[in-house]
Amino acid sequence: MATVCKITLDAAEYRKELEAVVAESRAAAGSLANLPDRQVSVTADTTQAKAAVEELAQTPTPEIDVPVTADDAPLETVREELEQTDAAARKTGGILAKLIPVSLREQAAQAFGAIREEMNKTRGGAGNFLGKFLAGGGAIGIIAAGIASLGKIAVTAYRNWINGMKEAGELAQRNAANIREAAEANEQLRQKSDGYLSRLSELSSAEQLSNSNKAEARKLIADLTKSYGDLGVKLDETTGKLSGVDEAMVKKLQRDKDRRIAEMETELRQLQSDNAAQAQVRDNAGIPVWFGGDVRLGGEADAKEAGQKIEENVKRMTELRRQLHEQRRSDPVADFRAKRQAENADLAKGNQERNRSFGQRKSDDAFNAAKDIDVKIANRRQGIDAERSSRQRVEAEAALGSAQTDYEKAKSAGDRDGMLDAEKRILQAKQAILASDEKIYAFEQQIDTLNRQRAEAVKKITDQAKYELDYNKLIAAAEFEKAAVLKLEKELKDQNLKLSEEEKKKILEQREALQKQDTAKQIAEAKEEVALQQLLVDGNYEAYEAEKLRLEMKRQGKKLTEEETQELLEQRKALKELNLRQNLQEQAYGLYGEAMTKAGRGREFEEQKALRDARKAKGGELSEEETAMVKQLSAISYAMANTRETSLGDTSVKTNSLTARGGFAGGAKLPESDKINREIANTNKQQLEQMKQIAAICEKLGTF
């Protein structure tokens, strides 16, 4: 709401003081005539002064209502009315100038100069100075007092006016600051809302939301609705899916742009209003002076302050206009859609690359798993065809052709920038094609390797078959030397070695000598074995053991002393005695078991045997739990080994000759089915019980 300042210019006091000036001027003429060392002739004609007083008396007291708003029209009216008052004061001052001698006018000019200086110092300086000056009395004091009264009127009017202008400017500044603060708060809210929508976008990508995510989504939608109204985001409570997030983002972006522009325009208008008010203060600062020329008294601080505020406002307005220009040119919705399209393109490219990589991986796995070379080659040829027809290669080849065409066009037109751009695209396309060529080359190399491997394998088999055939022919013909030479050539070829004839001859001689040595060794060992077996046949067991030990040590390359030989023979003899006792024990225990079984105590024997074997396996006595478990297993084993076979009786169908020839069916006798079923059920029951017992023991042992 605008502030209304009412200014009343009351000249009554000034009239009284002016009449006093006229009266005093007469007395001043007499007093001036009596001044020492000076002769002054003064004509005190008061006719014109009286006329001025009468004219001033006829002038009505002006009252001015000043609405302090951003509109400067009322201020212009104030300025015009003040100018009228100033003109009346100047007219009166001109009349007084005619009444006062030149010397007094000079003194008055000095006095008013002092007044001007004092008023420029401080806001209250003028009143203090005039009070002291008028206290001296005299004609000059009276004249100054009259002018001071008019000055008081002007100062009061000016101060009211300047305060009103400052108040208007401060109001505009406060409004602009409030708008700016509100815009900053709104911007924070907008950014926070962007975070809400980003989170909703993340939640919308989920197949199904949990209860906590649903609660979060509801809160985010509610917060957005408070700031922007219904943006169209929907939560399906049944499926737990979010929809309409991208559409909501589009609506929000457009509303945010409109609101930013409105906020900037409002702040700009407030700053413009403040600048208009500050310009009035700057251009009209100070009080008009009626003596000493058309200048103004004071107001330097007001003008400086107003200028600084204008400068600050201009900087802010410049920044606002720049931001407004950027906002009006911006298209956040198009940017958002372009971003989404780019993201989708990246996802599509990523999926395409992953599918291609996955397909290549499957092809490589099939290639590595294949054993047949033809299958491997077919796999790699398929990879070559797929690479040559791939989308990346086709697009790269098309891009290369297009870029080459653009390069030639730019070259013909002398467009250097166009040539550089086309050259860059040519290089990028060639890089993509080169990467594809590298893959094709790798596949072709694998095919060549497989073909070489197959050819080498065929040649190796053929060469081996030919070698074996030739070697066997030489052996059959008793041409052993030639066979040895052929074998050596084959070995050298397999190892990719080349030897001179002399080296080959030396190797053959060494092999022949080694063969003779080996033959002699085999003959000697065979003779020793025959002699050893002869001792065994003759029953000379001690000599047999001694000779056997000697041959073993000889073949191992060891040499024993007579004492060591005798000690080993004694240890072996003791070991054989123990083995004999163990065999005899086992035979006796076996006979003991047969006797107990024939006596009907087979189950008891099986239990004793099981405990004996368990103690032997453990290497010590059994615990109570182990003993019970061994006995249980023994009982089950005995029962399974001695379970009688299921006896179903005679299952054949009995009939007579008449029934066999097609007579009455009642003449045939069928097996007893109930008896057979009972027998089968009992057998199955016993087997099931045994299985349960075995399973329980196994679980206890930790095997199940």
Image (spheres, grey):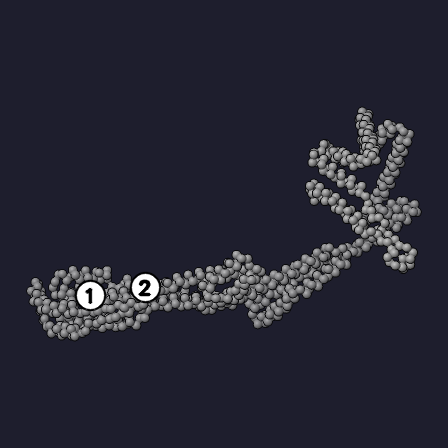
Q: Secondary structure at mark 1?
A: helix
Q: 632 or 538: which is nearer to us?
A: 632
User: Can I make out residue 100 in this image?
Assistant: no
For badge 1, the amino acid type reads Lys
Percent position (x, y) of residue 236? 54, 63
287 to the left or right of 459: left
Percent position (x, y) of residue 339? 54, 64
Q: Secondary structure at mark 2?
A: helix
- Bin the neighbour count of mark 2 within 10 Å (Cα to Cα): few under 14, some 14-19, many 20 and up: some
User: Can I make out residue 10 in this image?
Assistant: yes
Q: Quadrant of the N terminus?
A: bottom left
What residue is shown at x 87% (from left), y 35% (from top)? 525
The residue beneath circle 2 is 170
Image position of 490 with respect to 138: above or below: above
**Which mark is drawn over residue 152?**
1
2 or 1: tag closer to the N-terminus? 1
Percent position (x, y) of residue 336? 52, 65
What residue is shown at x 72% (from left), y 57% (from top)? 366
Q: Quadrant of the C terminus?
A: top right
Q: CA distance from mark 2 to mark 1?
A: 26 Å
Residue 51's image quarter?
bottom left
Percent position (x, y) of residue 554? 83, 32
**Which mark is drawn over residue 421?**
none
Q: 497 or 392: which is nearer to us?
A: 392
